[in-house]
Amino acid sequence: MLKLTARQEQILNLIREAIANTGFPPTRAEIAAELGFRSPNAAEEHLQALARKGAIEISPGTSRGIRLLDMNAIQPASRKAARQMVLPHHALLQLNLPLVGRVAAGSPILAQEHVEKNYHVDPGLFSSRPDYLLRVRGMSMRDAGILDGDLLAVKKTDSARNGQIVVARLGDEVTVKRYKKSGSIIELLPENPDFEPIRVEPKHEDFALEGLAVGLMRAWG
């Protein structure tokens, strides 16, 4: 068992809950807001302390780049993957993920003509095993830390829970939004006040969930 302060344990639980509920670890700003810190810098100091104690790993070059390492802090379903992270020949465990760029109207998201390149990435960066990377277009999810040009790791699924970030197809457009369902009404919510929510009426023939966001990589160059 790691010897953590009460505050560090609180932050570790917050990280675990955020990953379980949304597929993403929280941002420094979200931790600060949740725990009443005056600035994200205070959250960063606690995260660095957790990293020094081996409870988490902070991954440079990724948005929300926090990975749980403490076996006692990881949900049972994640423990097998966590054990794999310490096996030798780490390169053999890397995922080969296609990067999907702009998607043509009406065609499958993983159609070969949409694949720009393939990336070999560490599976430990993601809350669940992704099936592909999607290049983000626009700034509608800015306040969730998802920026234009980022690479969103997506797990293929046709269902989601409220609050999760999803990739959805609506008509001829593929969009990244936060999912909310109330009764038979689905709303795709932006994380930027400059954008309006998208309301999906029941039996909308042109709507489909393409996948669930399970991580994010920031593109460099």
Image (cartoon, rainbow, N blue to C red):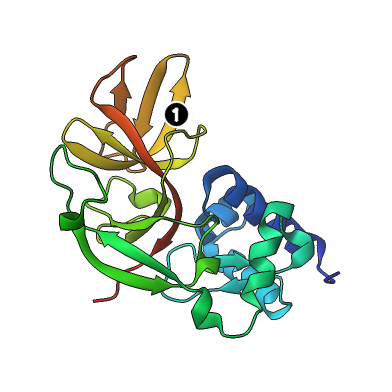
Residue 79: x and y in percent read 71, 61
Res 66 → quadrant: bottom right
Looking at the image, residue 68 lies above or below residue 13: below
Q: Quadrant of the C terminus?
A: bottom left
- Taking the spot 18% from the left edge, 48% from the top edge, the residue there is 103
Residue 63 seen in the current view:
yes
Residue at 55% x, 68% y is 124
Residue type at mark 1 is: Lys
Which residue is situated farthest in the bottom direction here? 89
Query: Residue 115 placed where, x, y %?
Result: 22, 60
Which residue is at a point 74% across and 77% down the rendered structure image? 53
Q: Is residue 52 above or below residue 37?
A: below
Sort mark 1 into few (<14), some (14-19) or many (20+) by Cα contacts within 10 Å: some
Left or right, 104 with reference to 178: left
Which residue does the image show at 38% across and 49% down from the upper left? 143
Query: Secondary structure under badge 1?
Result: strand
Can you tell which quarter of the image residue 133 is in? bottom left
Instruction: From the viewer's side, name the closer residue of 194 and 205.
Output: 205
From the top left corner, tell me how far across and down residue 203 is, in percent.
Answer: 32, 15
Where is mark 1, residue-wise? 180
Left or right, 198 with respect to 72, comes to left
Report x, y in % for residue 136: 27, 54
